[in-house]
Amino acid sequence: MDEACENCPKLCQTRTHVVHGYGDVGGDFLFVGERPSVEADEVGVPFHPPAEESATSLRRILERLGLCDSTSPPEEPTLENVYLTTLTRCRHPERSPTDEEIDTCEPYLNAEIRMINPEILIPVGERALAEIGNEYTTTPAEDLEFPEVHATTIRGRGFELVPMIEPREQTDDQTQAWLEHFVELMASDYRQTKGRRER
């Protein structure tokens, strides 16, 4: 993937890094956010936790699930069975990505999803839910809204989706509900019969 991509001129002018996906390329779980955070743009790792890390950062959630080594450095987290990525690879400091910018980055995301071939897609936030839901489910858009679908499982085309409200926007109860739902899913026979490779 292009480390010097210039397909979106207005994003190239403001980014620090092109933030491609990161994690276990054999993972069953793939988290997709909207765009790199301020911290991710600075270090080049998606979902990089803020300096004042809260209990509801994605990193803390992954640690509680046993998917991230709590002793690994934030700029190089040790992830197991999980891969992290975003709809766009670059960040504009003053606005969300445009539809055109998301469309321009879509081949990167599609390539990652094909490469990882996850069992579960976790769209994080409204924009990721809309894009992933439209592409990978037959569920009408009006039925894919937060907070109703947070901490639920939605049958997709080849994947199951477990939507998550942006961690920084979750209440403690919403975080706990999502964790409990995902722990139950991890303990279940979630693997689909879709010709997955043996690992």
Image (spheres, grey):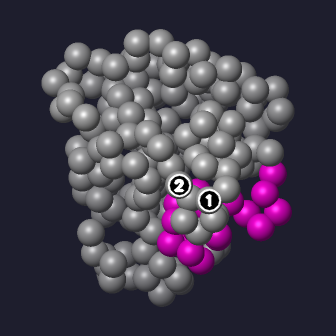
Q: Residue furthest top?
A: 188
Residue at image mark 2: 78
Gap between marks 1 and 2 measured at Cα: 6 Å
Dot placed on the residue nearer the N-terminal end, 1 or 2: 1
Secondary-structure class at tag 1: loop
Judging depth in this view, the residue of 188 and 92 nearest the camera is 188
**At x 31% / y 63%, what residue is drawn?**
104
The amino acid at mark 1 is: Ser
Q: Is residue 164 above or below residue 6?
A: above
Kindly tell me whether residue 134 is visible in this rendering.
no
* 41, 78: nearer the viewer: 78
Q: Position of residue 55 (x, y in %)?
A: 80, 45
Residue visible at 32% across and 43% down in the picture = 26
Q: Residues within 10 Å of mark 1 (few under 14, many from 20)?
A: few
**Residue at x 44%, y 39% (from the top left corner):** 81
Which quarter of the image is occupied by the C terminus?
A: top left
Q: Are marks 1 and 2 in contact (CB under 8 Å)?
A: yes
Return the mark for residue 150.
none
**Residue of label 1:** 72
Helix, strand or loop status at disc 2: loop
Visible residue check, residue 82 = yes
Based on the picture, tell me whether residue 86 belongs to the magenta stretch. Answer: no
Res 152 → quadrant: top right
State which region is magenta.
Answer: 36-54
Q: Nearer the viewer, residue 22 or 66?
A: 66
Q: Amino acid at mark 2?
A: Thr
Is residue 45 inside the magenta stretch? yes
Name the spot of residue 126 as percent of width and height, x first: 57, 41
Q: Nearer the viewer, residue 147 or 28?
A: 28
Residue occupying the point 34% across, 20% down: 191
Position in image of residue 1 (x %, y %) = 27, 69
